[in-house]
Amino acid sequence: MESLRYKAAIVGASETTELGIIPDKTPFQLHVDASVNAIKDCGIDKQEIDGIATTMNPASLAHYLGITPKWIDNTQVGGTSFLIHVRHAAAAIASGLCETVLVSMAESGRSRVGDTSLSTFSEPTLEGMKDSSFPGQFESIYGVYGPTTQFGLGVLRYMKETGTSHEQLASVAVAQRKWSNKVPRAMYRDLITVDDVLESRIICYPFHLLECCLVTDGGGALIITKSDRATNYAKNPVYILGTGESVETPIVSQMYDMTSSTAFKISSKKAFEEADVSHSDIDHLMIYDAFAHLPIYGLEDLGFVSRGEAGAFIEQGNTSPGGDLPMNTNGGGLSYTHTGMYGMFAIQESVRQVRGEAAHQVPDVKLSFCQGVGGMFMAAGSLIFTNSSPH
Amino acid sequence: MTDKIYRKPIPIPTPESDFFWAKVSQHELWIQRCVDCLKPFFYPRMVCPHCLSDKIEWFEVSGRGSLYSYMINHRPAPGFEEDSPYAIAIVQLEEGPRMMSNIVGIENTPENLILDMPLRVVFEDITPAITIPKWRPDETIKYG
Ligand SMILES: [Zn+2]
């Protein structure tokens, strides 16, 4: 297939008006709020939108906003779905299926307003919960209880094989707080030390509270259009230069290698090839951080550092403000916000950095790499953005 | 088997896993391998994940394994309150595949649970029909 390089651009991008704790809005209302904000961000006439990609029912959003699309995507593979929506939207635009796509995401992850479907765990019956799925048969019976008890199952193995320390794992949270310290919309902004992290309550060993993501309410939306009409709007275009996606397994205990994400490797390699850029060209990096080990796995699986080097790389400040590879500059899922499907917020921060309008701006960002994860290493999506015009 | 009500999740066998759970209830651990490419695999499937052959056979494993990785959960799942904190472990079977389990016969602490320590399978009877495989340290092998 033809490359998606420079075929489409993000022209509108916005999060929900409020972020964090929003006790009076349903996820649907948050979708609408984010979508309207993104439309206003670029000043587009909504009648120009002829495609919708979202994890909710696209018909519900389309009808509510009075949009009649000729292309939809309802891919739902967890928190990276929105990165994959962007990729699919670029492909649809490149092949002429539509011209302008709205990508929308929202969750009432903390307040759970009007959304019983978000309650993953039903009350056990007296006979115990019964589950015939493979994760149900081979994982739930051993007391797993959501992502905190599953996502990090390979981490002790990774630490033993690479010599990575608990202090280095904790330094991920420390580095990201240095970013969120100057981000007014971040949930947590106070600087922390490695000792603060290691002295915080153990949630699921080896993970302490400060190594686990927040649980918040909010959302975000994007407007994507053809590159050759992307300069018609209020903000400078953020061109989509490279894209990738993959899936591995819905059963975390059956990953091919529990110390590395196969989906990260496949997805990011594809994005680099498509963008025709190298790692040293990247000015800004987002790696979806539901837990502190994800940026470590990500740095290695994306190829920014060699096997076993990521913990020291972060600990030494390379991803912190002033470092060579600024990463998770909004504070990430650990400090900024995490509604459950964080990927949209990683995209939003990449867009802000490339536009030069981030709260904690990195100087002169020309290329931003955004890496998403879905489920527990179930899925991956990768995007590379630039503000440089096509030649 | 205790008289107490068992509040933890119970596996519901499917056509692919019926044999696995039936053998476990007889206190035997069996997994599958491919007759064509000879590779063993877990979880149960109707075709080989390596070559898609449908010539699959069950075989009894040695019951020997080692501790590949784990976490110790301090926020118990419903039904697991009395066990907290408890380890959710990944066991490396001698035959190759890995499976999730709990570690019994030893207090679940980071000091006690040493990666690669040898383990032996044990069987915990839940109901007359359902038994769950778990693993305990193998004291016959010196480690650490
Ligand atoms: Zn085979």
Image: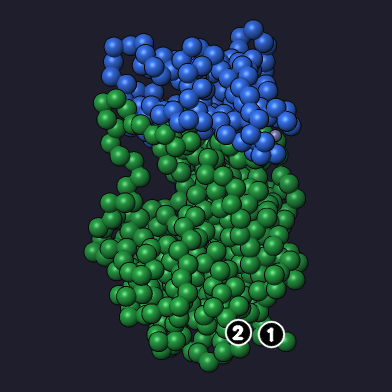
In percent of width and height, residue A278 lies at 76, 67
Same chain for mark 1 and mark 2? The answer is yes
In percent of width and height, residue A316 lies at 67, 53
Residue located 41% across and 82% down the image: A39
Residue furthest to the bottom in view is: A232
In this rendering, the label closer to the viewer, 1 or 2: 2
Chain ID, green in image: A
Q: Nearer the viewer, residue B101 or A367?
A: B101
In percent of width and height, residue B70 lies at 55, 31
Mark identifier at residue A310 = none
Above-or-below relation of A106 to B81: below
Disc 2 residue crowd, few under 14, some 14–19, many 20+, Cα 10 Å: many
Secondary structure found at label 1: loop
Mark identifier at residue A390 = 1
Task: Say which quarter of the image contains residue A166.
Answer: top right
Chain ID, blue in image: B
Q: Which residue is mark 2?
A: A227
Q: Nearer the viewer, residue A153 or A208?
A: A153
Question: Could you tell me if residue A110 is visible in this image?
Answer: yes
Residue located 29% across and 11% down the image: B3
Which quarter of the figure is the N terminus of chain A placed in?
bottom right
Residue located 56% across and 87% down the image: A230
Task: Say which quarter of the image contains residue B80.
Answer: top left
In percent of width and height, residue B84 lies at 39, 27
Residue located 38% across and 80% down the image: A68
Which quarter of the figure is the C terminus of chain A placed in?
bottom right
Report how far apart the C-alphas of labels 1 and 2 lie in the structure. Answer: 8 Å
Q: Are marks 1 and 2 in contact (CB under 8 Å)?
A: yes
Say what amino acid the circle numbered 2 marks. Answer: Ser
